[in-house]
Amino acid sequence: MSFTITYDENLIEELSARFDLRQPNQEALSALVKRLDSGDYSPLEMLTLDLATGVGKTYILAAFIEYLNRQGARNIMVVTPGKVVQDKTIAHGSERYIDGFTQPPILVTPDNPQGFAMAESSRGIFSSEDSSMVFVFNVQQLFPPKDEGKSAATGQEAMRRKTWRWQEEYGSLMEHLRGLDDLVVIVD
């Protein structure tokens, strides 16, 4: 990791208000950031927020992405357990969208790799250079394709190929992700 996360109580308070975090969720966000700032945290160590369904993990996730952005970490990968959760996570404009970002993140998925190309070539036009780039994949999309030699695929296999294969319009998403030194991976 080429950046340092520092604990900023004022930023925690601001983001808690912007993202309408309940007190336990604010405490979870604060504990997470304090752990990252502790000095004895290894980037290879997995941290876990063990919270029940429906208590607001997605709100904590959104506030954490904004916190990371404000600390200079602008490349975040969110890994979901499957396509249904992935679709819910990227449903911008739906009634479930969580507002509060200073600059809305640029979302990149295998279904929308063009977001990656647009962001890389024209950040100043479509968004601020300060926007986070959030890569949202489900677990299955991270595995390499089963048969690289086949020219056609459907369903999940087609999504894997979009992630791993070099595309003329935007290159290879997976190679880009591998080359990032500030990528933060969050698993839902």
Image (cartoon, rainbow, N blue to C red):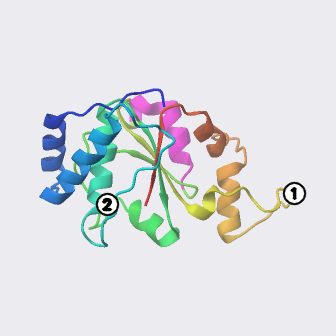
Mark 2 to mark 1: distance in Å? 38 Å
Q: Nearer the viewer, residue 149 or 69?
A: 69
Q: Which amino acid lies under the numbered mark 1 shown in the image of this protein?
A: Gly
Residue shown at the point (24%, 68%) measured from the top left: 55
Q: Where does residue 90 sit, x and y in percent of width and height?
A: 41, 59
Q: For the C terminus, which image quadrant?
A: bottom left
Q: Is residue 50 above or below residue 101?
A: below
Q: Is residue 65 above or below residue 91?
A: above
Label 2 sits on residue: 58
Q: Is residue 180 left or right of residue 184?
A: right
Label disc, if present, on residue 51 of the rendered structure: none
Find out whether the residues at labels 2 and 1 contact each other: C-beta distance under 8 Å.
Answer: no
Residue shown at the point (18%, 44%) measured from the top left: 15
Q: Outermost residue toward the right?
A: 149
> Magenta span: helix, strand or loop, mainly?
helix
Q: Earlier in the sequence, mark 2 or mark 1?
A: 2
Q: Outermost residue toward the front?
A: 40
- Looking at the rendering, which quadrant does residue 125 occupy? top left
Q: Which amino acid lies under the numbered mark 2 shown in the image of this protein?
A: Thr
Specify few, some or many for label 2: CA neighbours under 10 Å numbering under 14, 14-19, or 20 or more: some
Magenta-colored span: 112-125
Q: Is residue 82 visible?
A: yes
Q: Where does residue 58 sit, x and y in percent of width and height?
A: 31, 60
Q: Is residue 70 above or below residue 16?
A: above
Quick one: SS at disc 1? Answer: loop
Q: Is residue 119 left or right of residue 60?
A: right
Q: Where does residue 1 sit, x and y in percent of width and height?
A: 48, 31
Label 1 sits on residue: 149
Quick one: SS at disc 2? Answer: helix
